[in-house]
Image (cartoon, rainbow, N blue to C red):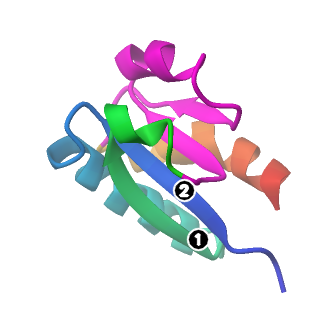
Amino acid sequence: MSKQLKVLAVCGFGVGTSLLLKMNIADVLRENGIDAETENADITTAASCSADIIFTSNELYDQLVSKVDIPLVKINNFMDKNEIEEKGMDAIKKLL
């Protein structure tokens, strides 16, 4: 049985866009048969959250990259499941 990953979706305030990203990440992971706990958070608390990988925007990536030592995935369009899959699945597979 594979390890359950903890995935974090991050936006500025941790409510609107990160919730959309969280739901789309969960869909992509489920479609790829990956068991993961997916949560969303704001940029301030993201650095102290326990997660295996973080998905965020280009703008917030630069703020997080120096604060965390886990993989970060930049997503341009939080609604684009193809982009989430293309950019995220390689990084996620390395964690399994």
Q: Is residue 84 visible?
A: yes
Q: Earlier in the sequence, mark 1 or mark 2?
A: 2
Horizontal side of 78 relative to 70 (left or right) equals left
**Amino acid type, residue under disc 1 in the picture:** Ala
Where does the image place residue 4, in percent across and percent down from the top left?
Answer: 69, 74
Q: Secondary structure at mark 2?
A: strand
Looking at the image, which residue is at 33% across and 62% down?
23
Looking at the image, which residue is at 69% across and 38% down?
70
**Amino acid type, residue under disc 2 in the picture:** Val
Which quadrant does the N terminus fall into?
bottom right
Where does the image place residue 60, in percent across and percent down from the top left?
Answer: 39, 21
Q: Is residue 24 above or below residue 87?
A: below
Q: Which residue is mark 2?
A: 7
Looking at the image, which residue is at 66% across and 72% down?
34
Q: Is residue 89 above or below residue 35?
A: above
Q: Secondary structure at mark 1?
A: strand
Tell me if label 1 and label 2 are in contact, CB under 8 Å: yes
* Magenta region: 50-78
Q: Is residue 64 located in the magenta-colored stretch of the structure? A: yes
In the drawing, what numbered circle is on residue 36? 1
Looking at the image, which residue is at 49% across and 40% down?
55
